[in-house]
Image: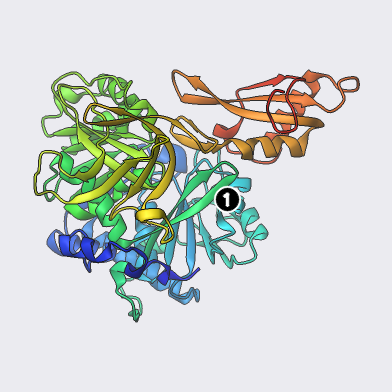
Amino acid sequence: MNQMQITLSQDPAAETYRKSGVWGRATLDALFRRNVRREPDRVILADPPDRETFTGQAAKRLKGQDCDRIVSALAQRFQELGLKPGSVIAIQSPNIVELPLMILGCLRAGLLPAVIPPLWRERDLVGALEALAPKALFGPTQVDDDLPADRLRYVAAALFSVRFVLSVGPQTPDGVVALDDCFERPNGREPRALTTTAEPADTAAIVTFRTTAHGHAPVLRSHNHWIAAGLAPLLEAGMEPGEAIATCMMQSSFAGLSTGFMPWLLAGGALHLHQPISLEVLGRTLVDDNVNRLVVPGSFSGELAAKLPLAETQSLRSVIGVFSDPRRVADARPIHGGIDTVDVVAFDEWGLVARRRRGGRTTPCPLGQVRHPENGANGPILLETKLTTSGRLELRGPMTPTDVAAAGGYQSTGFAGRPADEGFFIVGRSDQVACVGGLAVGLDDVSEVLREIAPVKAVRACAVVDPLFGERIEVRYAPSDLATISGDMIETQFRDAFDHLQIAPHKVPSRIVADPTITASGRRP
């Protein structure tokens, strides 16, 4: 994987983005260094206060100068390991300080970080990473009952390109390189300077992954793409320099990074990381750390806000609700108590729109050129949306990596939209991808697993509406020989195999039903 794959020449509108000022020459590490210079002694990055309960390590609160030394120590270590500029490091981590610092350490060493959702297991990891040919994998030794570093050893064995598995935490597995000293005792020395013939801001910065019907595929963005994405929530919410952000969104997706990591770099404030389920701990952080912006999953923003001490948080200026499944925007519950609310609607890994609620209610996504903030006549155009004659949503703009061959520079998203007053709502998907609790699942991928592990002549995985998680997976199958094996036995084989194959828990079907009418194509005759 070559770090220089994303360049300005790939986007026909690049010159327009430059002239508008949305694209420039700043890199993500340059933004970070600027913030450290401004406030070296301020705490700018903090762990979940309850970190010790799920990693076995005490929570960290890091000042700007401490973060900078750690980033340099990581970059220097990567160089000592012989990782050359352009090499990929895959990072699988929960919301702990090591995650953003690993991203920045990779960038300072000229490497390309690829962030992986924490719930992914071996099958997902191997399939998604093959195309990237990573040279190293990183994960903590422990997250509750999960052992990411140990799992990554098996992933490394399946990927010929991997030279190192890296980790932090107690009881480092055999063969894994511990990086704890870089975080606990950084030496403060700068890594070797990088030389490049390309404009640094135009090179690939961070890789995320989109879900397809059959698995996962990498999405590469340049520094300029990421800055444009982070500007959307920052401008719509009216964030000011130095503000404190608390986020429950995992920093392992386009939506999570664009609403947490990127506004943190752009605004130059503090980033307080949290796990999605620790509401009591999050409530204390809002009050004790004078948080200004709270980022939560949009589908649960109303419920979460009702359980948090928002009335006690005099510093809180807005709640930012992130909809990883844009179909759920229209049904979002209002947030009471007069708290300003901004909805961020993510269209998979391709782009997002941020809009402030009107009268406490969500609004349709805008069609055409999308400015941020909405009420800013001179605000930058960060995205352009279009519904085709068949209702399919396409995007282009400075945050969206676009296939040069795409018609008009538009990127197809797999979503279907319904026009509404002043815009549109997303009503479905056309790409055989479900969304379970905000996590995408390829339905054909699930079906393929089932075909491999049980005697069936036909199988079909489908998405069923679920009031809590948005969707859940249901499987129907036709046994290959009804006379020799019962439906209960096949269902048992399915569930045992999912556990044995280390399938991500959100991909496990909630219901498995025998249906002899299913044909080999997965449909009823």
The relative height of residue 422 versus residue 467 in the rendered view (above or below) is below
Q: Residue at x 27, y 47 (%)?
A: 384
Percent x, y for residue 480?
84, 28
**Image coordinates for residue 107, horizontal then vertical, percent:** 36, 66
**To which residue does mark 1 refer?**
125
Is 166 placed above or below 230 here?
below
Whether residue 62 appears in this view of the structure is: no
Q: Residues within 10 Å of mark 1 (few under 14, many from 20)?
A: many
Describe residue 396's horizontal placement relative to residue 342 as left or right.
right
User: Looking at the image, which is closer to me, 339 or 430?
Assistant: 430
Give the number of callouts.
1
Instruction: Kindly state the secondary structure of the residue where label 1 is placed.
Output: helix
In this orientation, which residue lies closer to the viewer: 90 or 44? 90
Q: Quadrant of the C terminus?
A: top right
Q: Quick check: 422 left or right of 454? A: left
Instruction: Determine the residue positioned at 53% across, 25% down.
Output: 472
Give above or below for 417 relative to 197. Answer: above
> x and y percent of residue 502 in the render?
64, 41
The residue under the point 23% across, 66% down is 15
Q: Amino acid at mark 1?
A: Leu
User: Which percent across, then down, holds residue 250?
Assistant: 39, 42
Residue at the limit of the structure toward the front, as seen here: 389
In the image, residue 520 sits, relative to residue 215, either above or below, namely above
